[in-house]
Image (tube, grey):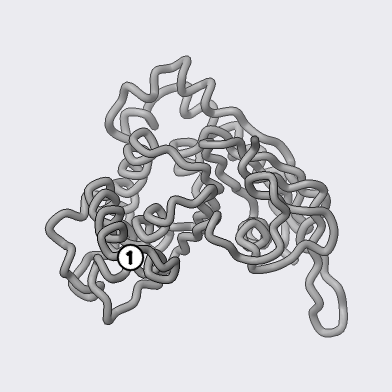
Amino acid sequence: MSAIVFEGVHKSFQREGKWLPALEDVSLTVADKEVVALVGPSGCGKTTCLRLAAGFDAPSSGRVMVGGRVVTSPGPDRAVVFQQFALFPWKSVVGNIEFGLRNKGLATDVRLDRVARVIKLMGLEGYETAFPHQLSGGMQQRVAIARAYVLDPDALLMDEPFGALDAQTRVIMQEELVRIARVNPRTVLFITHAVDEAVYLADRVAVMTRRPGRIKEVVDVRSVRAAEGWNDLERIEEVMDLASFVHVRTHIWRSLRDEKGSAN
């Protein structure tokens, strides 16, 4: 069963007494354990798509489904990772990660076992008692991703999760996300402005038009990755140097360039 499905989704917002269309007839499927990156011009509705999948907003028409159920509100089957880390400054790493599990009423031993496993997965060993202000930006984002992973959601929704990081840390986190996905794959809708990041991380890249946003095309990256042996390379720069990577990236850039225009 497909994990995330947009079916003929339209979304408009009211501003100064007028209805402004943000999305127009968006249809997109993210299969189980697939990573799909959404790219497009500024203001095209990428984050609106994520908010609809999260249940923070409702479509004007059409529907969004996760796990075969229509999304009508936020739920434990979906976890969101934002660009800003949004950690509780008064809680330790363990306290932040286990927060959602406490709300679910899980027993202490069950919570701590799940937290310990995700701390190992995220490479956070040794930082269990640290507080957010004692962590680098990259480490804080690891905690934010761990907090989402520990809930064992059907879908992970990531809105520019590395956008606030410096260039070097961003590359490290991209490599870490690929490593984590191989060990513990999840269904991911990943919003980004960075084409390189989208091609490196995603199985498919969905390109949106300028507002009102539509799905212009969906580029299959997974088949290129498999054919060219990207998975055998450990470093992002090794992948980005490949002619096949450059070809896919250039194709997406040209598709986006065609959409250049003023954002409404």
Residue 45 or residue 85, whichever sits in front: 85
Q: Quadrant of residue 254?
A: top right
Please indicate, yes or no, whether residue 45 appears anywhere in the rendered image: no
Please identify the residue farthest to the left as the structure is shown.
126
Q: State the quadrant of the N terminus.
A: top right
Give x and y (percent) for residue 206.
Answer: 64, 41
Q: State the quadrant of the C terminus.
A: bottom right
Residue 207 or residue 177, whichever sits in front: 177
Give x and y (percent) for residue 189.
Answer: 56, 48
Please identify the residue farthest to the right as the structure is shown.
18
Residue 194 or residue 126, whichever sits in front: 126
What residue lies at 69% left-to-right and 58% top-to-bottom?
71
What residue lies at 44% left-to-right and 36% top-to-bottom?
200
Regarding mark 1 in the picture, which secondary structure is present there?
loop
Residue type for callout 1: Glu
Decide: is 130 above or below 178. below
Give x and y (percent) for residue 51.
Answer: 63, 63
Please identify the residue farthest to the bottom as the structure is shown.
16
Give x and y (percent) for residue 132.
Answer: 25, 72
Decide: is 16 above or below 204. below
Q: Mark 1 points at which residue?
A: 98
Please indicate, yes or no, whether residue 219 appears anywhere in the rendered image: yes
